[in-house]
Image (tube, rainbow, N blue to C red):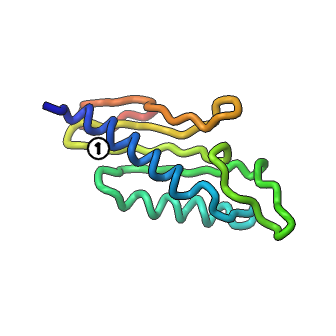
Amino acid sequence: MITDRERAAFEAGIKLGALYHQWVGVPVSRESASSLEKAIENAHIQQPYMTDIAVRLDRELMIPNSFGYSELSGLMLDVELTVRVNEASCHACIAREGEYPMMRIEWIDEDTEIPNP
């Protein structure tokens, strides 16, 4: 039998992977970055079990091409999200580790309240 804790970890991982593969490559500029951050948040908070999401894009890595925009890369992503399955919550993130966008679980909690990370 799968526990709520295991399901919450699975859901968090699936959501991070989907977000990464859905948005990498989309056109972005420093001027449009904040609207893209909100679009990503607004799209993904709709998914089942999602309770919170925060997206920040590294504008320093946005080097415009000859047409004036960049393509979103995994290294630009700084994402934190929380999912809840019954009484289990999982907080996970995408964050740059060196030259790689690493996905990881920050914490899993089975209490009735979500702790502050």
Tag 1, which secondary structure? strand
Residue 21, compared with residue 75, is above or below; it is below
The local crowd at label 1, few if under 14, some if 14 to 19, many if 20 or more residues have their Cα within 10 Å, is many
Q: Position of residue 103 (x, y in %)?
A: 51, 36
- Please name the amino acid that badge 1 sits on: Arg
Residue 29 higher or lower than 58, as above or below: below
Residue 75 lies left or right of residue 8; in this view the side is right
| Position of residue 107 measured from the top left corner of the image (x, y, whole percent) | 40, 29
- Please name whichever residue, 18 or 104, is drawn nearer the observer in this view of the structure: 18
Say above or below: 107 vs 16: above
Observer-nearest of 58 and 15 = 15
Figure quadrant of residue 24: bottom right
Quadrant in which the N terminus appears: top left
**Can you give x and y, in whole percent of width and height, for residue 96 in the image?**
64, 36
Residue 9, how many percent across, how many down?
33, 35
For disc 1, the marked residue is 84
Residue at (70% x, 58% y) in the render: 71
Left or right: 84, with 33 as reference point: left
At x 69%, y 66%, the residue is 32
Going by the picture, which residue comes out furthest to the bottom? 67
